[in-house]
C-alpha cells in the first residue's frame, strides 16, 4: 500500500457529522480536546486547566470556545468557523460559553457528548450556562464516522507501521541474555524516534520476558533476559496523529517445547483471523475464528482477551474484535489481530498485526515475520 499523503477535507467530515447528528436525533455535538475534535477540525489542543469545546450542529458552522492564548490556531482555517475566546479570569468563562452555545444554536434538545472523554471541567461549564438541553452519549455517531479510514488516514497508518517495524529491526541485535526489559524498552523508544515517530507515542512499549510474558499488559522491569525465555515486545509509532500497535514474540536461546508449541498455535490463530476477515463478516466471527484454533489445541482458558481492537487516532477505538460484537466489517475499517496464550509462571505468546478491510478482503499494514524467532543464542 502506498504511503502518499493527500489533504484532508474537513468540510466533508463536518458535513458527515451533520448527517450523523440528524440520524441520531440530536441537536448538536459538544466535544472537548481529544481525537474526535482533531478529526473534525484538524486542531490540536492539550487537556489543561483551560477548557476547550467544539460545538457542532447541523445548520451552523463549528463553534470553538477556547483560551485567548490559543486563538492563533484558528487564524488560517480552510473552513468557516466561529470562535469565542476567554481570558484568564474564570469568572468570565460562563458568559463566553453561553455565547458560544447560543451561536451553535443549542436550545432545549439533546446534545451529544463523548462520556469517556468529556471532563467534569467542561461538563460543569456547559451546565452552568442555564441553557436547557440534555447531554446524551454521541459516541456511536462519532465511531461510525471514524471507523472508515480514508486513503489519507490509511497512508498515515501504513507509515506508522513502517516506522515501528524499522525501529524493532534496529534493536534486534541488542536482544541477548543479560539485557534488562527496561533497557530494551528504552532502546526501542529511541529507535522509534530515530526512525521518524512523532514524540507522543501511542503507549509505552511492553517488553516482557520469561514469566513476565504471561502478563498481557506487563510493564518493563529490571529483570534480565536469560536463555530459555520467551520475550513479548508490544510497541507502536505515531505518524501525524495516527498510530500503529504491533506485537511479536521471540525466544532467547532454545525455549521449552511447550513454548514452541503455543507459539505455533498462536501463529495459526492469527492466520485464521486474517483468513476470515473481509467485508460483510462480523467482528465476533473474526474473534471466534482465532479463538477456535486456540480452544481446539486445549488452551482456550489461556486466551484471556479479545482478538483485536480498532486502531487509528487512538490506540483502542471501534470496532472491537470480540465475542458478542455483531458489527459487520466494511471497507476502511482498521483494527488489530492479536491472539495470545499466557501460561502463568512460564511465559506467553502474542502475535499482533495492524490490518484494514478492503473492497477485496483484508490488507495487513504489518509484514514482519510472525514465526517464533530465536535470538541471542
Image (cartoon, rainbow, N blue to C red):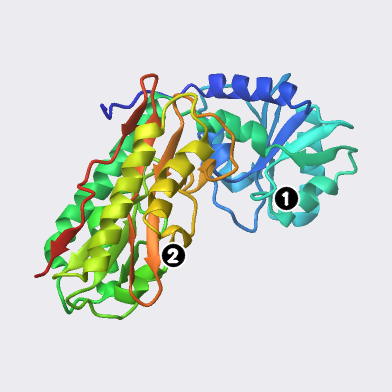
Of residues 143 and 163, the one drawn nearer to the viewer in this rendering: 143
Query: What residue sits right under mark 2 in the picture?
Result: 217
The residue sitting at 55% across, 20% down in the picture is 11
Q: Which mark lies nearer to you, 2 or 1? A: 2
Query: In which quarter of the view is residue 260 placed?
Result: bottom left
The residue sitting at 31% across, 41% down in the picture is 271
**Mark closest to the chain's N terminus, 2 or 1:** 1
Residue 18, given in percent of the width and then of the height, sits at: 67, 22
Mark 2 closeness class: few <14, some 14–19, many ≥20 residues within 10 Å: few
Of residues 202 and 76, the one drawn nearer to the viewer in this rendering: 202
The residue sitting at 21% across, 67% down in the picture is 257
Of residues 267 and 153, the one drawn nearer to the viewer in this rendering: 267
Of residues 89 and 119, the one drawn nearer to the viewer in this rendering: 119
Residue 153 versus residue 269 in the image, above or below: above
> Which label belongs to residue 335?
none
Point out the image quarter for the N terminus: top left
The residue sitting at 29% across, 67% down in the picture is 185
Confirm or deny contact between disc 2 and disc 1 (CB under 8 A).
no
Q: Secondary structure at mark 2?
A: loop
Q: Secondary structure at mark 1?
A: helix
> Which label belongs to residue 122?
1
Residue 42, given in percent of the width and then of the height, sits at: 50, 34
Amino acid at each position: 500500500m502506498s504511503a502518499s499523503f493527500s489533504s484532508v477535507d474537513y468540510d466533508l467530515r463536518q458535513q458527515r457529522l451533520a448527517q450523523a447528528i440528524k440520524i441520531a436525533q440530536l441537536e448538536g455535538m459538544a466535544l472537548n480536546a481529544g481525537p474526535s475534535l482533531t478529526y473534525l477540525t484538524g486542531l490540536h489542543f492539550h487537556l489543561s486547566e483551560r477548557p476547550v469545546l467544539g460545538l457542532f450542529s447541523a445548520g451552523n458552522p463549528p463553534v470553538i470556545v477556547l483560551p485567548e492564548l490559543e486563538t492563533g490556531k484558528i487564524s488560517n482555517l480552510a473552513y468557516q468557523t466561529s470562535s469565542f475566546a476567554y481570558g484568564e479570569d474564570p469568572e468570565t468563562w460562563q458568559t463566553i460559553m453561553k455565547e458560544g452555545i447560543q451561536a451553535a444554536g443549542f436550545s432545549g434538545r439533546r446534545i451529544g457528548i463523548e462520556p469517556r472523554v468529556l471532563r467534569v471541567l467542561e461538563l460543569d461549564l456547559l451546565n452552568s450556562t442555564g441553557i436547557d438541553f440534555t447531554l446524551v452519549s454521541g459516541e456511536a455517531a462519532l465511531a461510525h464516522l471514524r471507523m472508515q479510514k480514508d486513503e489519507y488516514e490509511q497512508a498515515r497508518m501504513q507509515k506508522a507501521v513502517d516506522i515501528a517495524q524499522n525501529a524493532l529491526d534496529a534493536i534486534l541485535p541488542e536482544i541477548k541474555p543479560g539485557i534488562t526489559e527496561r533497557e530494551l524498552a528504552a532502546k526501542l523508544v529511541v529507535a522509534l524516534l530515530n526512525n521518524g515517530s512523532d514524540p507522543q507515542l501511542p503507549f509505552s512499549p511492553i517488553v516482557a520476558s520469561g514469566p513476565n510474558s504471561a502478563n498481557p499488559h506487563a510493564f518493563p522491569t529490571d529483570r534480565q533476559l536469560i536463555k530459555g525465555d520467551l520475550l513479548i515486545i508490544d510497541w507502536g509509532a505515531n505518524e501525524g496523529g495516527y498510530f500503529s500497535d504491533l506485537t511479536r514474540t521471540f525466544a532467547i536461546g532454545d525455549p521449552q517445547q511447550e513454548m514452541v508449541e503455543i507459539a505455533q498455535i498462536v501463529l495459526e490463530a492469527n492466520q485464521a483471523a486474517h483468513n476470515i476477515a473481509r467485508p460483510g463478516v462480523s467482528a465476533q466471527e473474526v474473534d471466534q475464528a482465532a479463538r477456535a484454533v486456540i480452544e481446539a489445541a486445549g488452551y482456550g482458558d489461556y486466551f484471556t482477551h479479545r482478538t483485536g481492537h480498532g486502531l487509528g487516532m487512538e490506540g483502542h477505538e471501534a470496532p472491537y474484535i470480540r465475542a458478542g460484537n455483531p458489527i459487520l466489517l466494511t471497507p476502511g475499517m482498521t483494527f488489530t489481530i492479536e491472539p495470545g496464550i499466557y501460561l502463568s509462571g512460564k511465559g506467553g505468546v502474542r502475535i499482533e498485526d495492524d490490518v484494514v478491510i478492503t473492497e477485496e478482503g483484508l490488507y495487513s499494514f504489518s509484514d514482519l515475520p510472525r514465526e517464533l524467532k530465536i535470538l541471542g543464542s
